[in-house]
Image (cartoon, helix red, strand yellow):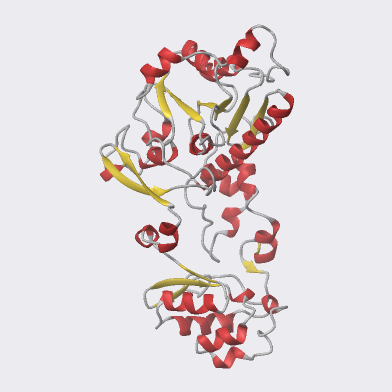
Amino acid sequence: MAKAFDGVRVVDLSNRLSGAWAARLFGDFGADVVLAEPPHGHALRGEPPFLDGEPGVERSLLHGYANWNKRSIVVHGVDEVRALAAGADVLVTTAAPPWPDTVDAAVDAVPRDAIHLSITAHGLEGPLARVAGNNLTACARVGWSAINRLVDEPPLQLPVHQAGYIAGVAGHVGAVAALLRRLRTGAGERVDVSEVEALALTNVPWAILGIFIGGDRLAHGPGGGRRRGDPSPLWDTANGPINFGFGDWARWSDAMEFLGLDELAHDPLYEPVLGRNTRDPWPVRRALARAAAPRDKWELFHGLSRLRCLAGVVQDASELARSEQLHARGFVVESPLNGKRVRASGATAQLSETPWRLERPAPALDEHGEELRSGIVPRAAASRSAQGGAVGPPLARISHH
């Protein structure tokens, strides 16, 4: 059965996670994704963690995850890059201006009705277009580091690679929108994604203004900011931490009685949901700490869930891999990597008629080079472009000056 992107050729010229992830999402839904690598391999091949802790171009778990459902070819010079790009429906790049020769050649050769997806630290335009960036600098720029902190302690970045994954999703969505427009107009276009801007989309005013002010003071009442050792947002149970979303508990009295906190069950300060978040949270936080300490986290989770009260168990990697919910949905998959099988997260979405499958594990370096070199034939639109018959203007150039 045909998949959503069957017949779509994506040429992945990325050198960072955001582009690789966007390209992989196309591959997950049927596109033919060609990973065009330099002789030393894609940058993710050098990123830890490595299989058994031993570095190697075929041993990076990040490469194994972000580059599956792709074919690999090592490109030698601009002529091979140009030949690949001439057959692309979507070209993915992550180089900031000024572009290297390979990206320059690819953009020159891409058909007029193709989509050029560019994902860079700050976007292709603006005063920071040429400035390097990574997850740490993105978290700092958009405010996540300012709020991800404890009182009197340094700010922290989000877990590593979050900016790359989020920007990759944003880029994929933008490129899909451009492909849909192409169906109606026959014209290609450039999709310009900034990793900083993509990450900023997740840091809405609610997170800044509704929870923190200046990173130190909790806006909800006079409780003050959190310090190391304070209960919340996680509470320790007998077998690991749990989160209580008590600010939204509609069945407050039932929840308090389940937790053995009868003294709070009918407290007029906290029983009404409306206004609860304006009250001093510390009496509740401390009471929840006492209630949680001797109890099992899963017993608390299931008990509160039956009351429709938000709670979240903090799971480690081994618990996540054993999750009944994830296994029931086929989310945990195994993929071969350098002779071993590794488990990883699977489908980004469940499609009813075209179920997700891991069609190809992450390729070895130049694994498909021979077949790709012998079969590089520009698609029909590229031929029309060469004859001056393509619909739509050529993609705009990015100034190198």
- The picture quadrant where one finds residue 147 is bottom right
Front residue of this view, candidates 153 and 103: 103
The residue sitting at 66% across, 27% down in the picture is 190
Report whether residue 76 is seen. no
For the view shown, which residue lies furthest in the top direction? 387
Q: Against 47, is 301 above or below?
A: below
The residue sitting at 40% across, 63% down in the picture is 324
Front residue of this view, candidates 393 and 246: 393
Q: Against 77, is 147 above or below?
A: below
Q: Against 365, is 372 above or below?
A: above
Front residue of this view, candidates 309 and 278: 309
Q: Against 21, is 148 above or below?
A: below
Report whether residue 240 is seen. yes
Residue 169 in the image, given as x and y percentages of width and height: 57, 42
Q: Is residue 183 left or right of residue 145?
A: right
For the view shown, which residue lies furthest in the front direction? 1
The residue sitting at 49% across, 79% down in the picture is 303
Front residue of this view, candidates 192 and 393: 393
Q: Is residue 189 left or right of residue 154?
A: right
Residue 10 in the image, given as x and y percentages of width and height: 53, 27
The residue sitting at 66% across, 85% down in the picture is 271
Q: How many marks?
A: 0
Residue 316 in the image, given as x and y percentages of width and height: 38, 62
Residue 81 in the image, given as x and y percentages of width and height: 49, 16
